Each structure stands twice: as structure tokens, then as C-alpha cells.
Amino acid sequence: MQIILFGAPGVGKGTQAKILSKKYNIQHISTGDILRDSISRGTELGLAAKEVVERGDLVSDDLMGGLVKETLSNMDYNNGFILDGFPRTLAQCTLLDEIFDELKIDDPYFIILKADTEIIVNRLTSRRLCTKCATIVNLKDLDGTKTCPNCGAKKSCIKREDDKDEVVRKRLNIYRETTFPVIDYYKEKYQLAIINGTDPVDLVTENIIKVLS
């Protein structure tokens, strides 16, 4: 089972991908996680992407396509996978089509999670990242402190640059301009379903599973 998850930043793609990955025993491929890992490790890719990510812009299509192809080529994808964060542009659609053709992947499911803009802005601007264990927590769960509820590190939970209000809104504008055409592109090619991403997490998962069934 190959699943492509679409949705604006903060709509819950990562949360659902982790749940579905465990349920179906398939690998979760998140381009966002790959990029953030490269940035944190200071790799050549990370250094090139850092400035772009912090501005809220998208990295180049070729770069993202190369990441996805390399990841899929180096894993056993016969059992399936969940791709989260790619494609986001029509140019990336062409790259993904080429990757799928080369790797003989021909029947993916496209799941779109939708949510109101202000709900997403509130979600993302309320996120905090633990600099020690990389856990992402909500501001309301910190009880007025910066102590990580996962690892207990004190003063470790910070707001990421790309979770600031102005950057979040810019990312959402980019999503609307570039990713909506992607959805139209795939409507004629593959099975596609739209799920309300503002429902409780368990209900969103239940609705996705119904669609996949």
C-alpha cells in the first residue's frame, strides 16, 4: 500500500502518517523530517536549505525530488510506504511520476487533509521544539515553563523559526498557490480522498482507514 498524504503545514499529516505507518507496518517518509535532520547535522544539503526553510520558502523541486528518489531507492517499498510532504508543485508531480515509473509504483492512494487557515496558524505558532530530544510539544502542555515533558530537560523547548506567525502565514500562502494545482493534477490519475483534518486525531485516523478500506 502506497499512501501520499497532502495538506497544509500543521494540518496533522505527520501525526496521521505515524499512526498509519504503525497500523499497516509501512515506512513513513517525511521530506520535512529529512530536511530538518540535514539542517541540524549541518550537512551540505542542510546548509543550503537552512536559509530557505527559515524564510518559509520551498526548497528547489530538483532537490526534493532527489531526496525522495534516493530514499525510495534505498528501502524495501514493496510492502508499502507513506509519503508526507511531496509533491508540492506541478514540477514535483512530474518528478514523482518519473520516480514511480522507474520504480514500478503504479497504484498509490492520495489522501488530502483539509483545515481552516486560522486553526492551522494557532496550531503551528503554539508548537515548541525540545532542543535535547527533538520532541514537538504544544505550548499549553508546558505549564508556563520551557521544561520538556518528554525528556525533562529544563529550558529546552523553543519556538522554531518556521513556526513564527508571519512565516506560518507565508507558508500557507505558498501552499495555496502551489499545491492546489497538484491536487487537480492527480484527481484524474489516482484514487483521491479529502478528509477533515480538524476532527479529533482518532476520528481523522478512522476516516482515513475507511477510505483505504
Image: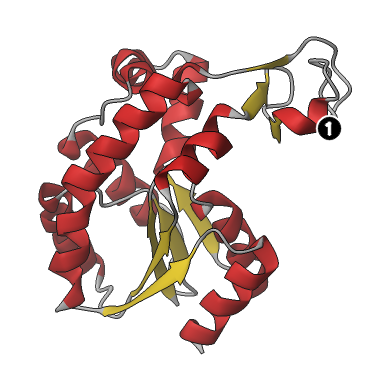
The part of the image, by quadrant, that contains residue 122 is top right
Reply above or below: 183 against 159. Answer: below
Reply above or below: 36 against 117. Answer: above
Question: Mark 1 packing: few (<14 Cα in 10 Å), some, or many (20+)?
Answer: few
In the image: residue 43, left or right of residue 25: left
Image position, residue 131 (x, y; %): 68, 17
The part of the image, by quadrant, that contains residue 66 is top left
Q: Residue at x 11, y 56 (%)?
A: 94
Q: Residue at x 25, y 78 (%)?
A: 106
Q: 174 or 94: nearer the eye?
A: 174
Give the colouring mode of the picture: secondary structure
Q: Residue at x 80, y 33 (%)?
A: 141
Q: 17 or 114: nearer the eye?
A: 114
Reply above or below: 86 against 44. Answer: below
For label 1, the residue is 150
Image position, residue 195 (x, y; %): 45, 70
Q: 199 or 110: nearer the eye?
A: 199
Residue 25 visible within the image: no
| Amino acid of disc 1 | Asn
Image position, residue 196 (x, y; %): 48, 66
